[in-house]
Each structure stands twice: as C-alpha cells, then as structure tokens.
Amino acid sequence: MKGFLEGLGALLLVSGVAGVIRELTDGWFRFLGLTRFLTENVWFLQGRELFANIVIAVLGLVLAIAGSRRAEA
C-alpha cells in the first residue's frame, strides 16, 4: 500500500505540474497536458484549468508524503 500511494502521488504531482506548465505557456507543450482531458470535459472546471492543475499537483504531493510516512505493515 505504501508503494501504491507513493506511485499514485508521484504520477499526480508530475501530471499536475505538467498541466500548470501547459496552461502558463498557452498550450505550447500539448504533450504535457495529461490533465487536459479532465479540465476540458468536466463542466465546472472549464475556465479554471490552472487552478485545477495546481490542486491536482498539491493532491499528488500530499499522497506522496502520506505514502512515505505510512509504516510498512
């Protein structure tokens, strides 16, 4: 479980940061937008892509930290 949380957190962190970079560069790096599918297809996230990517990156960081602090059973 520890490895799963760390892996999922790392994936979310990287995709969130990549989405932030994509949004700040006005879409120059299209291959970085893994979260683009989420932010373009969910109605309440449309127009808030930068905020959504920041939240995804922070959630990934929290999951990675929680996974590293979890004691191996």
Image (cartoon, helix red, strand yellow):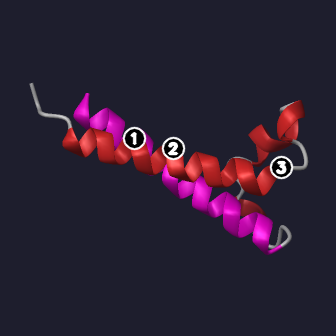
Name the residue rendered at 50%, 53% in the picture. Answer: 13
**Is 70 in front, or is 19?**
70
Q: Choose between 72 and 27: the one closer to the eye.
A: 72
Quadrant in the picture for the C terminus: top left
Amino acid under disc 1: Leu
Is 68 placed above or below 30 here? above
Mark 1, Cα crowd under 10 Å, few <14 / some 14-19 / many 20+, is many
Mark 3 Cα shell of 10 Å, populated few (<14), some (14-19), many (≥20): few
- Residue, disc 3: 48
User: Does the magenta portion include 13?
Assistant: yes
Residue 59: numbered disc: 2
Q: CA distance from mark 1 to mark 2?
A: 6 Å
Q: Looking at the rendering, which quadrant does residue 16 occupy?
A: bottom right
* Residue found at x 64% / y 55%: 54
* Residue 63, numbered label: 1
Location of residue 42 in the rendering, given as x and y in whole percent from the top left corner: 83, 32
- SS label for mark 3: loop
Sequence-wise, the earlier of marks 3 and 1 is 3
In the displayed structure, 48 sits above or below 43; it is below
State the separation of the CA atoms marked 2 and 3: 16 Å
C-beta proximity under 8 Å, tags 1 and 2:
yes
- The span picked out in magenta is 1-25
Crowdedness near tag 2: few (<14), some (14–19) or many (≥20) residues, C-alpha within 10 Å: some
Q: Main secondary structure of the magenta part?
A: helix
Q: Position of residue 68 (x, y in %)?
A: 23, 45
